[in-house]
Amino acid sequence: MGRARETFGKRENRTKQEKKRKEKEAKRLDKKDGRDGNNMDEMIAYVDEFGRISSTPPDLTKRVVINAEDIQIGVPKYVEPEAGEITRTGIVAFFNESKGYGFINDLASKKSIFVHINGLVDPIKENNKVTFEIVDSPKGPNAVNVKLDKQ
């Protein structure tokens, strides 16, 4: 019995398979010889001082030495304020005696600071000039030891 005729599709599939097999064999031989293209020197990347990735190594003459103790990660260490910074002056912008709270405009920083009736030493009213200390609370800065300014 004779060999069956081969259709065009079968012949194409066979040639594609032979081509893939030859390419795979060529890649295997290249890898064996060390010509695979995955050279470690080509894989190295450098990062410059601006964070950009480049293929050229950095210039060692421009190297800057950084002291490890100077690097601060997270919240900076607390520094005690000086005596002059503790007591501040301001003007009472709003105070509600029935509710027991108000706001003081700090003259130095121009910020509005919350004041509660528990933080008062002297009774205050709106537009009074006062001296106070700032204490940080979970909701923000609070004025405590609020006294009328005698000047």
Image (spheres, grey):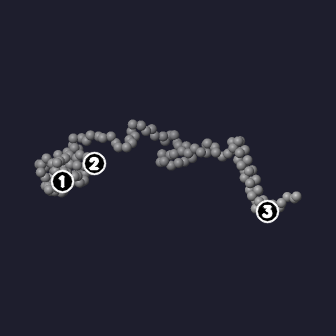
For the point 87% across and 59% down, which residue is it? 2
Gap in angstroms between the C-alphas marked 2 and 1 = 17 Å
Q: Quadrant of the N terminus?
A: bottom right
Image: 63 above or below 125: above
Label 1: state its secondary structure. strand
Q: Nearer the viewer, residue 117 or 37?
A: 117
Rendering coords of residue 32 (x, y %) = 70, 42
Q: Nearer the viewer, residue 95 or 35?
A: 95
Q: Which label belongs to residue 101?
A: 1
Rendering coords of residue 100 (x, y %) = 16, 53
Identified by mark 2, the residue type is Pro
| Residue at the outermost bottom position | 8
Label 2: state its secondary structure. loop
Q: Which label belongs to residue 7?
A: 3
Identified by mark 3, the residue type is Thr
Residue 107 appears anywhere in the view: no
Label 1, residues with CA under 10 Å away: few <14, some 14-19, many ≥20:
some
Image: 112 above or below 38: below
Q: Quadrant of residue 29?
A: top right
Q: Which label belongs to residue 138?
A: 2
